[in-house]
Image: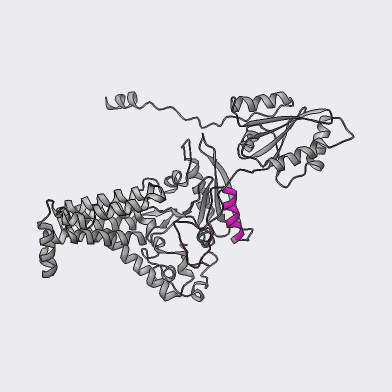
Amino acid sequence: MFKDIRKFFFKTEKKQNTPKPKKKIEESLEKTIEFFQKEFDGGADLIIRKIKIFNSDAAIISVDGMINKDITNDIIKTIVNFKPQISNPKELYSEIRDKISAFPDQLEVFYYEDALNMALIGCAILALDGQNSILVFGVQGFEVRSISEPTSEKSQRGSREGFVEVLRFNMALIRRRIANPKLKFETMQLGSTTRTYVSICYMNDRVEPEIIDEIKKRLKKCDIKSIMTSGCISPYLEEEGDLSLFSSVGLSERPDSVCGKIVEGRVAVLVDGSPTALIVPYLFIEYFHNIDDYAMKPYFASLNRIFKIIAFFIAILLPGFYVGFATFNPELIPGELLNKISLATGSTPFSLMMETLIIHFLYEILRESGLRLPQNLGHAVSIVGGLVVGDAAVNAGLIGAPTIMVVALTAISTFVIPNLYEPIALLRLLFIIAGGTLGLWGIMILFAVILVNLCSKSNFGVPFTSPISPFGLFGMRDSIIRTSWKTLSKNKNKIQNMPGSVY
């Protein structure tokens, strides 16, 4: 019965695994023009410019706004002014291809679908009547954002360059830092509607071929119609059935950070239209690392990492411990502090757990509004936030001052590890509920569940908590404590020649 109801409400169509065969280019120029006009269906941005090349009909086909018009016009002038001594269309085409229109980024295609894809990414198409192939020129000239420092990954001593939205530019930023022929880029198209280009970057002498094959296999399973950002394909790079709050797919907007991971033996995935690179496999301990760690003295870099780890535990555990101790185990709190907490909470209309949840709820609303509003309105949000969660709320008897202090310290600790904000925000609420309902026992049980989940998580055969669990002495040289570059430069094998290697 239930199966019949499910079939009635959730009708599914069988996927066609057999790809549609490509259509070969015909010798008729009118057929080629007709194909593009049909595909664009009257689109205003399709440009078809018919020209004459030594008594032969030809056409330049492009998409408005995607090409550099100056370069395109130079190519057209060169071809139009060509005066060959032959009249055979096939020989004329060969002369143009091999001698006259020799261009650094030139390609010959034999299928309509390939020509259409090239036109959509900013290429100019030269079609000649009587020829069953088409010349494609890379004359991309669309507007792009200039390369600037990433806003989410600030660095004091590192590079000021960050990824942009153009895939080719991002590939060049990586290639410029790794001038090695072993660095490989493999590009594929994902998304049946957007046909977004995705590039897999790796060094083929440092990555196992099985990992590359598995990455390609997972990406090919991505059945999303439109891919607008790297976050659309990130879940497909996770292990199937992974229920963890933490992601084993790293994110970075810094080319230097991504290059460091590639040299270690990782794989980077770039998505056209997104300034964020995906890194697989990624370790939990790397959330506490920063590119500046490798420009500082080892003792100071290690101290920073320890501070970040302490801030992480404060961000997720402090509100829960505060609620649990004050509600179930007040005898564990020093007397003077307990008196102040009792006086503050006694004058408020809510329980301590509800009060803490309300403040965190208000804080998340204020954070989201400050993040989404225009920059010139940010000061207004700060003023309103200070009134809502500040002295005015305390004087009105709605919120206790100790609770505000706990929430403020928790928020500051969260900002230390911005890449972990999402799991921290959820875990913080779960620990508040656990501490408010079951006390210290509830916090310990929830912490044990999260710890077991972390230790059992892996991706591409690499444990997520490596090298701490399972313990690896060689990997510990760049985990919680960072050793000197003289130690990091000592290789155990050809793979482990950079800090943080997971192999």
Q: Is residue 151 shown in magenta?
A: yes
The way the protein has been coloured in the rendering is one colour
Please say if 27 is above or below 452: above
Q: Is residue 12 shown in magenta?
A: no
Quadrant where the N terminus is found in the figure: top left
27 left or right of 269? right
Please say if 12 is above or below 230: above
381 left or right of 325? right
Farthest residue toward the right?
Answer: 85
Residue 355, horizontal then vertical, whole percent: 18, 53
23 left or right of 224? right
Where is residue 78, by image quadrant? top right
Residue 393, horizontal then vertical, whole percent: 19, 54
Question: Which residue appears at 37% of the width and 63% of the height?
Answer: 470
Question: Which residue appears at 13% of the width and 51% of the height?
Answer: 350
Q: Nearer the viewer, residue 423 or 264?
A: 423
Residue 133, horizontal then vertical, whole percent: 73, 33
Please say if 396 is above or below 63: below
Question: Which residue appears at 64% of the width and 38% of the height?
Answer: 118
Asked whether residue 243 is in view, the answer is no
Q: Nearer the viewer, residue 68 or 53?
A: 68
Residue 389, horizontal then vertical, whole percent: 24, 54
Read off the magenta span: 149-176
Asked whether residue 461 is in view, the answer is yes
Question: Which residue appears at 19% of the width and 59% of the height?
Answer: 403
What is the count of numbered marks? Answer: 0
Q: Nearer the viewer, residue 128 or 212?
A: 128
Question: Magenta residues: mostly which secondary structure?
Answer: loop
Where is residue 409, by image quadrant? bottom left
85 left or right of 412? right
